[in-house]
Image: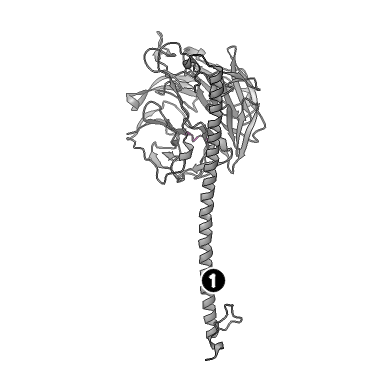
Amino acid sequence: MDARSLKKPKLEEPDGDVLDDKEGEALQLLIKHRSAEVHDLKKKVAFYQSELESAEKRLVSAELKLARLRSSSAKASNEMRAGGQTLGNDSNSCRASRPQLVIPALGHSANGALLFRGPSKSGPHLTVEYSRGESSTGLKVSSDPQEMKKKQKKGGGITEQKEHKDLIPSVRTCSSSCIIGFQSGNYISSQHKRKLRSLVLCPTNDQIFATSALDAVVNLWQLQDKGSGALRLGTTDCATPRQRRWPEDLTWHPDGNMLFCVYSADDGDSQVSILDLNVTGKKRVTFLAEKPHAKGIINSIIFIPTVDSCFATGGSDHAVILWQEKDGAWKPKTLHLNQHSSAVMGVAGLLQKNILLSVGSDKRIVGFDLLAGRSEFKHQIECKCMSVLPNPCDFNLFMVQTGAPRVQLRLFDIRLRGTEIHSFGWKQDSSESQSALINQAWSPDGWYLSSGSMDPAIHLFDIRYNGKEPSQTVHAHQKRVFKAIWHQSIPLLTSISSDLSIGFHKVR
């Protein structure tokens, strides 16, 4: 047989439109060859994609280990220096301590006014105590969180330290989430005439909470029957004197005896008010004379954990303002005006770190060092930011709410600056628009986030779950849910909604 007759056809595409048998066979072999080639390349792409993801995870893990190692080394060094300086002193007087919480007793005066007292003999209490140093901004801040001294309380009670827990290594490590069982919710009227705006827990007694609404009224509540409902303790008109504006946001004083409200900076109206719960009558609400914000809505107010008698406000004028109590009066100081190029939507102070976080519509996250008086970092993301919330247990972890549908929540490690360690969100059935009024809250153990929604539902997220969707959804209310907060002493979620009701959702 001629050797040429055994030669295989060349794997080339034939010319012309008419194919003979040999050309057809050659084309079939060419297709088979290239199909195998495509299949092999796809396998290689999948392999290297998997290798890339594994390498990225190993990189983040190594960075976290390095950060923890540096933190441990710094802590050990500080403890050695502190030990050398306090040698021979009583050990109980020289132990470094973290901020402590104390639950005060709640009572009433002879005329029926609600009283918020400090430590008493009736139960456990918490106090927040810091050692202070002068910063370059003139604020009295803690010079070293590791060297905060535990001060002796006046009176009885049990002190409890807020301990740091390293939660970040467990983030996004589970393929399934832990489901929380809830009983059927109980609902009461908020007794507001217009849509609710805010819901805040008293920092010294979480059975006390306050609500505000577009009717400019602030209602004070106390839980009843272990969270089955609540009794309204009082109601106060907090509308501004000139334009009758409602509070845009409110927060508790750390002592739990006053509520601070912020408004709008337009038309020369009052910007901050103080509702003193130990005062009755018209003098219960006072408006601060200072008006440091230039224009627009003041979106956020928060007390700073590491600064003595100081709160921060962020507004639509791009400004972050610090307010500090001096000689019985609250004095404002501009922290920064040009770190954001758009409205500042949220501010938050980190526990045991002298850094104030701010987020804005300019898609920027800014960490400002209160000791140095300058920005520590700036991080730009791809969508606008609406709020920021530090984790209550892991002092390095914080959450940012964004305007991206289905990816509304982002987790960050303060040590890794711009590195996002997890993101998740939800799909809204009623609308894809994102509202800055839909707020989040951390569970006391730091593992869960609760969020309201434009839909009548509360979404829960387990940060250990590696999925991006809610770990579970609690259907509640008749209209959109603004916020759902966790209580510290009772297994309970309390929520507010635009249906003008307050919901109580007990954990089984």
Q: Residue at x 57, y 38 (%)?
A: 416
Q: Number of numbered discs present?
A: 1
- The residue stretch that appears in magenta: 436-440
Left or right: residue 271 compared with residue 119: right
Residue 141 place in picture, x, y as percent: 59, 21
Residue 172 place in picture, x, y as percent: 46, 43
Q: Amino acid at mark 1?
A: Arg
Closer to us: 30 or 111: 30
- Whether residue 238 is visible, yes or no, is no
Q: Quadrant of residue 481?
A: top left
By secondary structure, the bulk of the magenta-drawn segment is best described as loop
Left or right: residue 354 compared with residue 218: right
Q: Name the residue furthest top.
A: 110
Residue 295 place in picture, x, y as percent: 64, 28
439 part of magenta stretch? yes
- Disc 1 crowd, CA 10 A, few/some/many (<14, 14-19, 20+): few
10 part of magenta stretch? no
Closer to us: 414 or 337: 414
Image height check: is 282 above or below 2? above
Q: Quadrant of residue 126?
A: top left
Residue 156 place in picture, x, y as percent: 40, 12
- Circle 1 — which element? helix
- Whether residue 314 is visible, yes or no, is yes
Left or right: residue 264 compared with residue 163: right
Q: How is the image coloured?
A: one colour
Q: Name the residue furthest right.
A: 338
Closer to us: 255 or 422: 422
Find disc 1 in the rendering and name its residue. Answer: 34
Image height check: is 186 above or below 25? above
Q: The C terminus is located in which quarter?
A: top left
Closer to us: 400 or 173: 173
